[in-house]
Image (cartoon, rainbow, N blue to C red):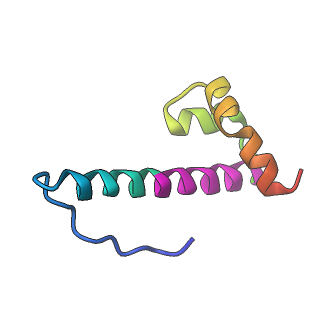
Amino acid sequence: MDVVDLPPVPDADDPEAALAAVVALRRLATRLEVEAVTEAVDRGWTWAQVGEALGISAQAAHKKLAAEVRARRGR
């Protein structure tokens, strides 16, 4: 994954810009999460380990991410 230079945080006085930044950050966080979990699973991590690293249960991690991990792995 490429390192991204982020623009300055928008001022809260500009809610349109601030909310657009929130959406962009969520998308980036989701992308990073999926890529990191895919790599972890490829390296043999269990869903329990993934869940612990994310601060959620193994079941929650699996439910949230397993389909995307399978899709990225071509399975």
Numbered circles on residues, count: 0
Residue depicted at x 10% and y 53%: 13
Residue at the farthest right position = 75
Please state the extent of the stretch shown in magenta in the rendering: 27-42
Establish if 68 lies above or below 48.
below
Q: In this rendering, would 52 be left or right of 23?
A: right
Please state the horizontal and vertical placement of residue 51, each as a whole percent of the image. 59, 33
Q: Nearer the viewer, residue 66 or 47?
A: 66
Location of residue 41 in the rendering, given as x and y in whole percent from the top left corner: 74, 48
Give coordinates of residue 9: x percent, y percent.
21, 62
Q: Is residue 26 left or right of residue 75?
A: left
Is residue 69 positioned above or below 53 on the image? below
x and y, in percent, of residue 48 in the image = 66, 30
Q: Main secondary structure of the magenta part?
A: helix
Image quadrant of residue 36?
bottom right
Image point (75%, 53%), residue name: 43
